[in-house]
């Protein structure tokens, strides 16, 4: 990466972990370290707080199905599971990822969570279109796609997710890039360092999220959160 970085436009560079053949101990190490970094920076709270908002008026006596897209090692769903149990919800949690190796690791890491299942599914496939759910979560996932792909994908998802979509993703900003570059000095995993910097450059500006929301013709709420995250909630009802 250049020392002088531009964040004017979203990068289209692919990340190492976009490779569905990425596997083995190096994948497991990357997933573990990503989970720890997200927890340390408070990123997971952005998703949990968003979930709280969309479920504010949910009848806790009724079960609710939540899918996590790009679930990785399942760390977000494990936190959601604990949150649900502490607060009296009846969650049915489903992790979705296109990488079978990632799903295998998520299953092994979540063996003690009876309310979580994992499935290897491409979100653009017919198989995904057949799924039923009430809430969709995406954490550091949507930045992998172009805006036109997001609009096309999110339109039908919004119609099915009766409580809405909770997005937790990166704010594309020079300071975020250089802060991660500084943090990367403590990270002994080349994949996380390279993908982390690329992810920042594939992240979003607020006006880009607003433009997508308006294209979807839906209610939305965008909140900036530390560390350079956007909590973006999409819902057919008022939030």
Image (spheres, grey):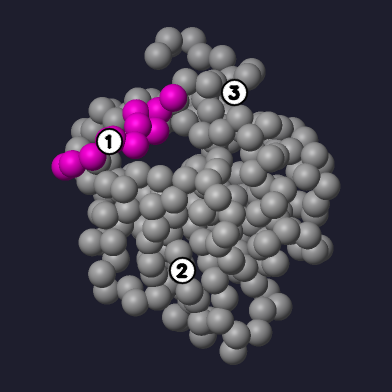
Q: Residues within 10 Å of mark 3 (few under 14, many from 20)?
A: many
Label for residue 93? 2
Q: Main secondary structure of the magenta part?
A: loop
Q: Residues within 10 Å of mark 1 (few under 14, many from 20)?
A: some
What is the spatial separation of the Cα atoms under label 3 and label 2, in whole angstroms? 32 Å
Rendering coords of residue 234 (x, y %): 71, 54
70 in the magenta segment: no
- Mark positioned earlier in the residue sequence (3 or 1): 3
Residue bearing the label numbered 1 = 22
Whether residue 176 is visible to the viewer of this picture, yes or no, is: no
Q: Nearer the viewer, residue 99 or 34?
A: 99
Q: Is residue 22 magenta?
A: yes
Question: Dot 3: what SS?
Answer: loop
Q: CA distance from mark 3 to mark 1?
A: 24 Å
The answer to which quarter of the image holds residue 33 is: top left
For mark 3, what is the residue?
A: 10
At horizontal 53% and vertical 46% (from top left) the residue drawn is: 125
Please provide percent x and percent y for residue 73: 33, 53
210 lies left or right of 1: right
Is residue 10 positioned above or below 209 on the image? above
């Amino acid at each position: 990466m250049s020392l002088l970085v531009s964040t004017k436009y979203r990068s289209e560079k692919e990340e190492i972990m976009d490779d569905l053949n990425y596997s083995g101990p190096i994948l497991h190490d990357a997933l573990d370290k990503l989970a720890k970094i997200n927890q340390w920076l408070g990123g997971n709270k952005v998703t949990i707080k968003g979930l709280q908002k969309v479920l504010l008026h949910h009848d806790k006596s009724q079960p609710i199905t939540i899918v996590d897209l790009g679930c990785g090692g399942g760390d977000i769903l494990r936190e959601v599971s604990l949150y649900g149990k502490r607060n009296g919800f009846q969650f049915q949690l489903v992790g979705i990822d296109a990488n079978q190796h990632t799903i295998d690791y998520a299953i092994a890491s979540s063996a003690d969570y009876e309310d979580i299942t994992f499935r290897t599914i491409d979100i653009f496939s017919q198989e995904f279109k057949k799924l039923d759910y009430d809430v969709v979560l995406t954490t550091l996932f949507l930045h992998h796609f172009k805006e036109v792909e997001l609009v096309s994908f999110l339109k039908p998802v919004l119609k099915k997710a009766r409580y809405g979509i909770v997005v937790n993703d990166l704010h594309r900003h020079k300071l975020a890039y250089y802060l991660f570059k500084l943090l990367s000095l403590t990270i002994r995993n080349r994949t996380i360092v390279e993908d982390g910097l690329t992810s920042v450059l594939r992240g979003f500006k607020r006006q880009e999220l607003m433009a997508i929301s308006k294209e979807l013709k839906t209610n939305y709420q965008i909140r900036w959160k530390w560390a350079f995250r956007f909590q973006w909630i999409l819902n057919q009802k008022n939030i």
